[in-house]
Amino acid sequence: MPTYTAPTRDARFIINEVLDLASYNNLPGFESATPDMIDTVVNEAGKFCSEVLAPLNQVGDKEGCTRHDDGSVTTPTGFKDAFEQYRESGWGTISQPEEFGGQGMPHVLGMLIEEFVGTANQAFAMYPGLTGGAVAAILAKGSDEQKEKYLHKMIANEWLGTMNLTEPHCGTDLGMIRTKAVPQADGSFAITGTKIFISAGEHDLTENIIHLVLAKTPGAPDSSKGISLFIVPKFLVNDDGSLGDRNSLQCGSIEEKMGIHGNSTCVMNYDGATGWMVGEENKGLAAMFIMMNAARLGVGIQGYAQAEVAYQNAVAYALDRRQGRALTGPAEPEAQADPIFVHADVRRMLMDAKAYTEGMRALALWGALQVDLTHKGATDEDKKKADQIISLLTPVIKGYGTDKGFDVAVNMQQVFGGHGYIQEWGMEQYVRDSRIAMIYEGTNGVQAMDLCGRKLAQNGGAAIQTFFATVDAEIAEAKKVEAIAPFAEKLEKALGEQKAATMWFMQNAMQNPDHLGAGAHHYMHIMGIVSLGLMWLRMATVAQAKLDGGAEDKAFYEAKLATARYYGDRFLPDAGALRRKLEAGADTMMALGEEAFQTAA
């Protein structure tokens, strides 16, 4: 049976030493995030996820969810009890506003807990996970009455929330939605339509579920400019906060999926259900993007979360499984064979996983810090810079993070050989579960086009120039440190490849937009490589300073330096190959007619 140990030491290193969260204690919400408090939260969250949630991961995969004749859904054995512990411990309230019952701590800590929960049990994590996006939308666009009515119990996880966007005929192109919202005399709306792929659409974990539903009012433009957002609760909520009548909505079925079986991914049918508009009519797209951006960061975390748990189990297997001899001579002559850990090809896969997961964790948490600083930065300039960085990084964290996370999960399955293909070892579940992260909350092709088609040019390219200036400045400082300079020079070369790719788009995409589409995926990966390179530069710089200062945990910091060097040798050079692919343009990609793709009899 696979196991999971929360990487609390690495998390504390990133938060306390690399991000130095204590240095922001002059900002609202950061004053209570002392190193001691952070250590307590990280360690206790890690213990809960490792001991309570991880053992239920295979249970949820094998049992799945059960839909009953009345449309109700039962979650897998143990999920309800585990959720009660999650709720009572307040893990979902860490970074939520105190005004509505949250703890008001930095978003960084909330994101880290999301990682631990998702790594231990991704299907379970999806129940409370989307509630955060729903809460964010209501906070930003909801009326005072709506905030008071729903947020206290949603933040306390007494009620959970969902996002209802996709319909059978449309996913990315939401302007095509057909769900209707008809105004009623009392100011509410009657919602009618069908939504699909609704994570946690129905379950038995909470007494109420607050659905946020996209729909169109009569006469609305038949495009994305005609979308409105509505709160549609499973049970209507009375003025005193008690639950009223059951609303006219139901789970029609549970999708039969490749993975995440423990989560009830529902077809939701709305039959004149009562809903209330959030924000302005025909302005639902803006509210939706608030939900989507929060969810996209969460999905990026899922990418490296599944890679992390797959990596942990692959390391354990590689140290135990014996096959063949080391090419340099028997590592353990007294044994019949050496552990497969000694083989360079196995070590390649494990080192790739280590370099990716640790780098991606640092990037995601730095991104979470930017979310905090966007709202709480000391100056308007700090807020503006943070907003530019996280706007640019969100599609990279989601797209590159989940592409590589899936690759790592597959490679960790490969470490197991034939046993990786067998259910009892758990590796094939990590592969299946990680696959969805490349698809939902906007496919990774959509993420790449968002990055290249919108974010690069936004505000005259201000965000990408801020990113380039940040990386350039840190490279310049690192080159002054003899031990770090070689890595800094390799990162500088990779950054040069990204700058050249950016310039190529500027010179060629206007005359042929297909050039942008053909190269967007490659550009997203180049930026992912450079972004993780920046994280490894920071981690190596801190590690070297700690070793120079005589740190006690010498092995930990030496491992950081060794992994940084590996990243510099094995990841950063890929930026050049990807740039050359990007500069090949769209001509050969788009040259063939439709008939050439059809298989002849």
Image (tube, grey):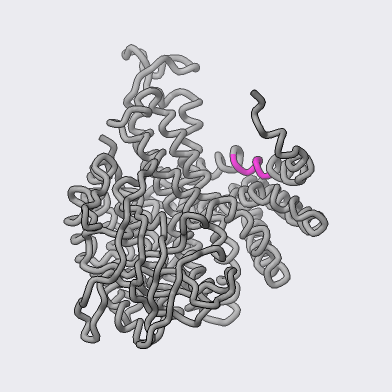
Q: In which quarter of the image is the C terminus?
A: top right
Q: Reply above or below: 534 against 176.
A: above
* Residue 408 seen from this side: yes
Q: Reply above or below: 357 against 239.
A: above
Find out whether residue 443 is within the magenta segment: no
Q: Which residue is drawn at 35% across and 82% down?
A: 146
- Number of residue marks: 0
Find out whether residue 573 is within the magenta segment: yes
Q: Residue at x 39, y 41 (%)?
A: 258
Q: In which quarter of the image is the N terminus?
A: top left
> In the depicted view, which residue is nearer to us: 454 or 314?
454
Q: Position of residue 550 (x, y in %)?
A: 43, 52
Q: State which region is magenta.
A: 571-575
Q: Where is residue 396 in the image (x, y as percent from the top left)?
A: 56, 55
Q: Where is residue 471 in the image (x, y as percent from the top left)?
A: 64, 59
Occupied quadrant, residue 301: bottom left
> In the depicted view, which residue is nearer to us: 510 or 540?
510
* Residue 18 seen from this side: no
> In the depicted view, which residue is nearer to us: 587 or 110?
587
> In the depicted view, which residue is nearer to us: 548 or 186?
186
Judge from the rendering whether residue 300 lies leftward or rightward of residue 257; answer left or right.
right
Q: Residue at x 48, y 33 (%)?
A: 349
Q: Position of residue 262 (x, y in %)?
A: 29, 48
The prevailing secondary structure element of the residues shown in magenta is loop
Q: Residue at x 68, y 60 (%)?
A: 453
Occupied quadrant, residue 176: bottom right
